[in-house]
Image (cartoon, grey):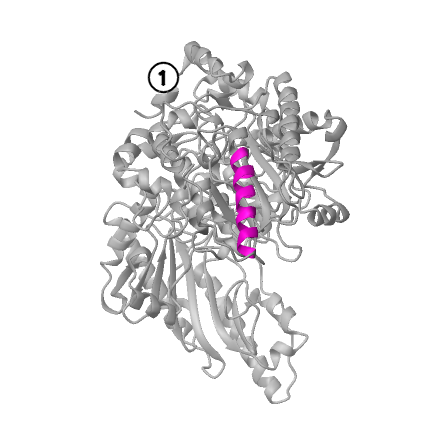
Amino acid sequence: MAKNCHNDYKMKFSGDEEFPDLSLHNNHMAKVLTKEIYAKLRGKSTPSGFTVDDVIQTGVDNPGHPFIMTVGCVAGDEECYEAFKELLDPIISDRHSGYKPTDKHSTDLNFENLKGGDDLDPNYVLSSRVRTGRSIKGFTLPPHNSRGERRGIEKLSIEALASLDGEFKGKYYPLSGMTDAEQDLLINDHFLFDKPVSPPLTCAGMARDWPDGRGIWHNNNKTFLVWVNEEDHLRVISMQQGGNMKEVFRRFCVGLQNIEGIFKKHNHGFMWNEHLGYILTCPSNLGTGLRGGVHVKLPKLSTHAKFEEILTRLRLQKRGTGGVDTASVGGVFDISNADRLGSSEVAQVQMVVDGVKLMVEMEKKLEKGEAIDSMIPAQK
Amino acid sequence: MAGSFTRMIGGRNGAVLLASLGAGTMATGFLMSDNPLAAEVRTKLYPPSSDYPDLRKHNNCMAKALTPAIYGRLRDKITPNNWTLDQCIQTGVDNPGHPFIKTVGCVAGDEESYEAFSELFDPIIKDRHNGYDPTTMTHPTDLDASKITNGVFDDKYVLSSRVRTGRSIRGLSLPPACSRAERREVERVVVMALAGLKGDLAGRYYGLRDLTDKEQQQLIDDHFLFDKPVSPLLTCAFMARDWPDARGIWHNNEKTFLIWVNEEDHTRVISMEKGGNMKRVFGRFCRGLKQVEQLIQERGWEFMWNERLGYILTCPSNLGTGLRAGVHVRLPNLSKDIRFSKSLDNLRLQKRGTGGVDTAATGDTFDISNNDRLGKSEVELVQMLVDGVNYLIECEKKMEKGQYIKVPSPVTQYRK
């Protein structure tokens, strides 16, 4: 274990003496944590030794941004969400639109339930992508796992991925020992992930021992990609140029189910429960862990006064094409679902498909100089 | 209350509970860390060999000294403050090092780290401190500044003089390991002691969190303010946690005696002034240190120190005296001469840029300081610095007159 497994030493100080100073903070953890909750939880430890101080360290170290609300806490293992629920339930509720501790989450990876999605105009929709994360039962999560565990995860993942066939046949590239040629190719394909430098990740202990146990797998067609041991045990990505989200989602679902089958056979299925869906490191990714999105050209719509409003109503969010912390370039936006927990994979991708279709139509109207007020949707 | 959750799930019932959560039998046994049987199961599931770091691309003292055998014996050991070997070496695993600079690659989390993990620390100490063998040698402490001779340099060459060291408060964990409460306790103990300083040492504490803009600007102008560490060597060693909680700067009114609280060590103590009067700088240094020590002792605290390793600090490179005595000195002729580096080596001095350890020199002004920390006393090291700088200035003067200069013979190493 990398973290202090015995909390007892700290217990000789009072809760007040240990309570973090959150006066300058603006993240979900700081909003929710009180001295009472802290006092109740500080004596606890999950079976693998993760404590509430470990959960909140990243949020203490990163007060947040006045405009962006970060989560400010992570799970170190599956049991955290139960052991520290006095803290995590309100955070989950706050982050996931009022999701209650008694709510149930539905999982639907049946791609046939998606309506349409194969006809997004490729003149506007440049590329389509669906990603999620998966955690492997029986291992602790990236903030906490030891080198031995991380390597165990890698080994299992390699085995599982190596058995994939047909359109999923591919190859694993471990980050340690990658040749320069391999590295250049992966960068050109936009597949390579770097050592995390973002403080919310490094302060949560996720960059330890880099690049040990980390790697990238992709199929020969370069349309299905798996990251091993980055921010989650696995990140699974399906993508392609153009607007055929239906095909992207089909491959996503089929690929995931194939992989899951193999892990289950080794008695290491994915972490999942009927309240929180798929268990991932960051509470913001609970539920489906799914971000389905497109790169779409919306130069006129994006400057319209009602753009933000439209996105909110469609339950979508915008990002720059470089990812979560970037700005848009040339009127091209990354548009994806805002929700993760409380609705299924099919429902979330449906919202992206329907929402993007509508926005492209709006863009076309604006190009002709016509008004779009009548098209503005009701809140979904 | 402590460990109540683990106690609740202890024993056979606990195993059933965990299994029902789907943890699997081997994993269940492994996860129950308070169960003595579980430790055995964990060792079988993840023996030390499975956790041994990949150090093939590494070039630091830790990577040189660590072996699978040492790791196997030490991995499951824990200090009384619950610090582990993995936590000591994390910074060295995460930072392979530089091909030209040899970093240490490990830190202590508490005083006991140096004992519990001595099998790793002792060879690292020997490597870093030029053969000082902690298993056989003792370290001398001498803070009697009156012994220094020829300690006033020519102001034409020496622009400023400075001595720094660190001190740790016994009984509290070090910056990589300390909890917020411990760190705040360090701050309380130190600030209370400093409030008792009088005369030319009387001064004031500025907590980092509550600095006004005006105070902050003043501290920056005085070159006193330290920033949140960004160097991965420090952040990977967990030293920036909870920033800026319980961090601060204390300095005397005359701005010649300065103390950093809870940066890389519990305290860093600095004496400085413009010009070349190193004797006075060192005198104030010793006086201030002794007074602070007395003030904390009055309240039942003491500094971490032992005969084997001298003053205990976070980084093994700072053991012994933890002392870096140095000057900013102009050496326009000598610094361009091919004999400069060798002269420094033989005098057991090092050069840095005037911005500190990772900067290059600009122009002709260098930061020249002692190489050694452990195995020689404070007085011995400062005298070596004094003798060395005087020699360098003599060379510079000679070169100005076009006269011949000689590389000095090497100064002696440790007494056995």
Q: Residue at x 46, y 51 (%)?
A: A307
Query: Which is more toward the observer, B189 or B170?
Result: B189
Q: Is residue B256 visible?
A: no
Query: Which is more toward the observer, B99 or B377?
Result: B99
Query: Which is more toward the observer, A242 or A108?
Result: A242
Tell me where residue A206 appears, x and y as whole percent.
Answer: 52, 40
Tell me where residue A223 appears, x and y as whole percent.
Answer: 70, 37
Per the image, the residue denoted by label 1 is B8
Magenta segment: does it hold A355? Answer: yes
**Vertical arrangement, residue B4 with respect to residue B85, above or below:** above
- When asked about the image quadrant of residue A186, the answer is top right
Q: State the SS at label 1.
A: helix
Amino acid type, callout 1:
Met
Residue that extends furthest to the bottom in the rendered view of this protein: B401
Query: Which is more toward the observer, B201 or A342?
Result: A342
Tell me where residue B91 appears, x and y as whole percent.
Answer: 54, 45
Q: Which residues are magenta?
A: A350-367
**Left or right: residue B338 compared with residue B48:** right
